[in-house]
Image (cartoon, rainbow, N blue to C red):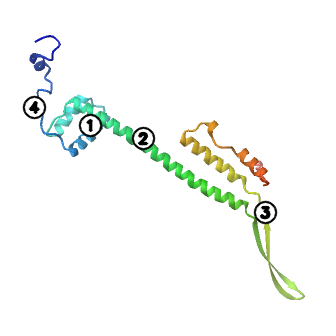
């Protein structure tokens, strides 16, 4: 036999490859799924491909070669990677939807903080010895609570962080929002924090 033209029968016999072993029936999809779960579990226990093949042979009425175990492990790794990417994307979508809801609630609260504040009171007393009850309603214009603008900016920044935008690409900051309100004719009052202990 010329050199480099395949493996001699003597070498094949020495190696004892599984190519010489007659193949049995193919595994069913259920068997493949069950095998992959077992292979993944054994790999996490730190077993080598050869040891996994041995242990799996003791559990099943068929055997898988170490090469087949390697192929199955590759498939398992790809499935794990796909699941982790799906989980990551799903978690991002959940967090983004929570931010959307929080933003909507905050915008509603901001709009309410711009509405005039109505005060109602009832005054009672006597007039010339006759009791009376007077209903009074007052209205006070408000400029809006800047805490809601700060919260909206925080929501925007968190959304940018989830989406992976860097700091330069983030939306306008609270100072720009306040300047916009001032330019529109609103009066913005920022509450002074009491620093007394």
Name the residue beneath numbered marker 1: 39
User: At numbered mark 3, what does the secondary structure look like: helix, strand or loop?
Assistant: loop
Please report whichever mark, 1 or 2, sits nearer to the chain's N-terminal start.
1
Depth-wise, is mark 1 or mark 3 nearer the camera?
Answer: 3
Identify the image quadrant of residue 8.
top left
Q: Looking at this view, is 61 or 88 the one in front?
A: 88
Name the residue beneath numbered marker 2: 85
User: At numbered mark 1, what does the secondary structure look like: helix, strand or loop?
Assistant: helix
Name the spot of residue 50 as percent of width and height, x first.
22, 28
Q: Is residue 8 above or below residue 22?
A: above
Name the spot of residue 147 as percent of width and height, x first.
70, 52
- CB contact under 8 Å: marks 1 and 2: no
Please report whichever mark, 2 or 4, sits nearer to the chain's N-terminal start.
4
Name the residue beneath numbered marker 3: 141
- Check residue 22 in the rendering and tell me which mark sits there, or answer none: 4
- How far apart in space, not on screen, are marks 1 and 4 (Cα)? 23 Å
- How far apart in space, not on screen, are marks 2 and 4 (Cα)? 40 Å
Query: On the picture, is 113 further left or further right than 69?
Result: right
Task: Check disc 1: other Cα within 10 Å, few if <14, some if 14-19, many if 20+.
Answer: many
- How far apart in space, not on screen, are marks 3 and 2 (Cα)? 51 Å
- How far apart in space, not on screen, are marks 4 and 3 (Cα)? 90 Å
Name the spot of residue 138 as percent of width and height, x first.
80, 71
Please report whichever mark, 4 or 3, sits nearer to the chain's N-terminal start.
4
Task: Check disc 2: other Cα within 10 Å, few if <14, some if 14-19, many if 20+.
Answer: few
């Amino acid at each position: 036999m010329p050199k480099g033209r395949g493996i001699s029968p003597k070498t094949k016999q020495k190696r004892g490859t599984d190519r010489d072993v007659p193949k049995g029936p193919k595994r069913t999809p259920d068997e493949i799924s069950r095998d992959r779960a077992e292979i993944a579990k054994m790999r996490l226990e730190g077993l080598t491909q050869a040891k996994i093949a041995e242990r799996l042979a003791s559990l099943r009425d068929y055997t898988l070669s170490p090469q087949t175990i390697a192929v199955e492990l590759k498939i398992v790794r790809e499935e794990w990677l796909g699941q982790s990417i799906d989980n990551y994307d799903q978690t991002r979508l959940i967090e983004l939807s929570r931010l959307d809801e929080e933003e909507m609630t905050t915008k509603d609260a901001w709009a309410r903080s711009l509405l005039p504040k109505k005060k109602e009171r009832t005054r009672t007393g006597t007039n010339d010895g006759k009791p009376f009850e007077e209903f009074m309603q007052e209205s006070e214009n408000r400029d809006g609570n800047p805490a809601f603008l700060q919260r909206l900016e925080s929501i925007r920044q968190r959304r940018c962080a989830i989406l992976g935008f860097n700091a330069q690409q983030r939306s306008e900051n609270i100072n720009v929002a306040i300047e916009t309100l001032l330019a529109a004719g609103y009066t913005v009052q920022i509450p002074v924090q009491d620093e007394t202990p």
